[in-house]
Every structure is written in structure tokens, then in C-alpha cells.
């Protein structure tokens, strides 16, 4: 058939059958375009699906794949148990320090929200994560029972949970105490209780009102109130100093040395020699 023109539409010569009628145009065998195809622009649009994947074997795809619909977009995986939705890099994509996969947000993707390196390290707030997960910024964990001053503690399998800081929560230690008392183990060896040492800036042993930096008070079951003992054969037993200058010393061998004026020596006895230097007889 020769080329014909109908109302400005030219039909060129060629092979095949062209039939017009009943508001339809039949091209070749069974290829029908109904009148609706020309009156409704959406009639010939169908969802874009890829049953075997989206590939380009001949030429390189140089443009981005962009989608845009009101309300946002969704990537939906399969419905089977083994239908895994995968986001994959390729061989040579990224390095141990360069991103392989990134999630970009903000104006025109101007903010990097998440980075995955070639070695699998994930960074949030950083593009060069140095560990399996590195977060640059604060972390908020709302699961479990968070609260002020609580801490995360791991169980044997690595599962963490919120815990309140208590003596019982740290190694099973419990017990009660009184302010300013230094604690000690109780008779069971598992709890704490008050000792006889009181510390309010001045230390009292057997007293809660020490008059000096150290005061020892109480009954010692027939023993001396304070006992000084050393296993060393050279160190002094006791030295009393003023501004770093020794004023009274009890030596390891029992010798006593004192500077200044000695008063109240009534009842002084010694099994050794008593030596006075600068003795003033009128003092007796």
C-alpha cells in the first residue's frame, strides 16, 4: 500500500496490517491501541518493575536513578523468608579509610548521616570510623529502665541493662553506715558497718568529738590505750615535732630525748641512765 494521509496523520508504506475502526487502531497482529490511550495520558503508564533486576550491559549508566513522589519513597523487598533486601558495594568500591556506602540527608544530600567503609566499619557523625561502630556525638538509649545516675552493665552474653549504683549492685556488697564513720566489714564478711574510727576533719578513735587532729579514747581491756610497736631495729618508736623539728623522741632502744623544759617529773623512774643537760636544780 502507498502512503496515505488522514487529517494530517501520514501512514507510511510497509509490511503488516493496519486496521482502523471501532475507536481502535490495530497494528500488525493483535497490537491494539484503544481510544482511551489517546484521551487519558495515564492510561499507558504502568508501574515500573524489574523481575530479574535492573541492569545495563551495553553502555555505562552515567546518570543518577532519581525518584520523587509526594509523601516519600519506599524500597520494598520480597515476601519470602529468603528474599533478602541487599544494598551492596562492588569490588574496589571504597577502602579501609574511604567510604563504600553513605546515606546522605539534608538539602540536596549535603549532610552525611551514615558511612560504611569497605571493611564493614560503620560511622555515624564521622566518615572515617575506626571501629565496628563509631558515633561522633551523644548516644541516647531509651530501652529498658533508664534513669538519672544509672549505669549500663553487661551480662555474660554481652547484653547490657540499666542498673542503679548501689553497693549491692557492685559485687554483692551491702550494709548500712553512719555519716563520718569509716566503714569496716561486718561479722559475716559480706556487708559493711561502722568502725570505731570517726572522721569529721579530725580523727577520733573511740570518740565522736576529737579535740585534736587525732584523739584516742576508751577502755582497751586492760591494755594501754595506744601501743606503738615496730619490727625494725633502728627506727624510732615515736617522734613529736613542731614545724618539722623533733621535740620529743622515743628511740627504738627505749631512750627518750626531749628538748625544752621538763615539768611534772614526780614519779619518774628508769632502769637505765638518766642524763640531764643544762640542769637547773631550782626546778626541783
Image: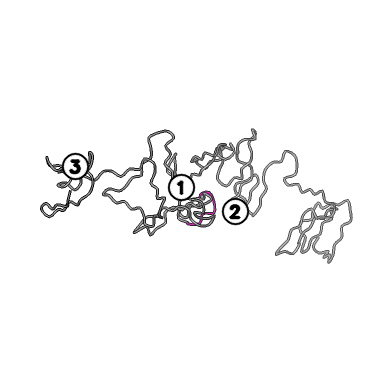
Is residue 183 left or right of 58 when viewed as pictured? right
Kindly give the residue lying farthest to the front in the view shown.
Answer: 1
Give the image location of residue 241, x and y in percent.
73, 61
Distance from label 2 to label 3 (Cα)? 105 Å
**Residue at (70% x, 64% y) in the render:** 243
Q: Residues within 10 Å of mark 1 (few under 14, many from 20)?
A: few
- The numbered mark, 2 or 3, whose residue comes first in the sequence reads 3
Distance from label 3 to label 1 (Cα)? 45 Å
Q: Secondary structure at mark 3?
A: strand
Residue position marked by numbered label 1 in the rendering: 88
Residue position marked by numbered label 3 in the rendering: 26
- The numbered mark, 2 or 1, whose residue comes first in the sequence reads 1
Q: Residues within 10 Å of mark 2 (few under 14, many from 20)?
A: few
Q: Secondary structure at mark 2?
A: loop
**Residue at (40% x, 33% y) in the render:** 80
Give the image location of residue 249, x and y in percent.
79, 58
Amino acid at each position: 500500500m502507498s502512503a496515505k494521509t488522514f487529517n494530517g496523520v501520514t501512514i507510511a508504506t510497509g509490511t503488516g496490517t493496519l486496521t482502523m475502526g471501532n475507536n481502535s487502531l490495530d497494528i500488525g497482529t493483535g497490537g491494539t491501541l484503544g481510544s482511551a490511550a489517546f484521551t487519558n495520558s495515564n492510561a499507558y503508564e504502568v508501574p515500573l518493575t524489574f523481575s530479574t533486576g535492573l541492569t545495563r550491559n551495553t553502555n555505562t549508566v552515567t546518570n543518577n536513578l532519581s525518584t520523587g513522589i509526594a509523601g516519600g519513597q519506599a524500597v520494598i523487598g520480597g515476601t519470602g523468608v529468603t528474599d533478602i533486601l541487599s544494598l551492596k558495594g562492588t569490588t574496589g568500591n571504597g577502602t579501609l579509610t574511604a567510604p563504600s556506602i553513605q546515606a546522605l540527608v539534608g538539602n540536596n544530600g549535603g549532610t552525611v548521616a551514615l558511612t560504611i567503609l569497605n571493611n564493614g566499619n560503620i560511622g555515624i557523625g564521622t566518615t572515617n570510623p575506626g571501629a565496628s561502630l563509631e558515633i561522633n556525638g551523644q548516644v541516647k538509649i531509651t530501652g529498658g529502665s533508664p534513669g538519672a545516675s544509672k549505669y549500663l552493665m553487661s551480662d555474660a552474653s554481652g547484653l547490657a541493662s540499666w542498673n542503679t549504683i548501689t553497693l549491692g549492685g557492685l559485687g554483692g556488697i551491702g550494709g548500712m553506715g553512719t555519716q563520718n564513720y569509716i566503714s569496716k566489714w561486718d561479722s559475716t564478711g559480706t556487708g559493711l558497718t561502722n568502725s570505731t574510727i570517726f572522721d569529721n576533719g579530725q580523727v577520733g578513735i573511740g570518740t565522736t568529738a576529737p579535740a585534736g587532729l587525732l584523739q584516742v579514747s576508751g577502755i582497751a581491756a586492760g591494755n594501754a590505750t595506744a601501743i606503738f610497736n615496730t619490727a625494725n631495729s633502728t627506727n624510732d618508736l615515736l617522734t613529736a615535732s613542731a614545724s618539722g623539728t623533733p621535740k620529743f623522741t622515743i628511740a627504738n632502744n627505749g631512750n627518750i630525748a626531749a628538748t625544752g623544759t621538763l615539768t611534772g617529773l614526780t614519779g619518774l623512774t628508769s632502769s637505765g641512765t638518766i642524763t640531764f643537760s643544762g640542769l637547773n636544780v631550782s626546778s626541783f
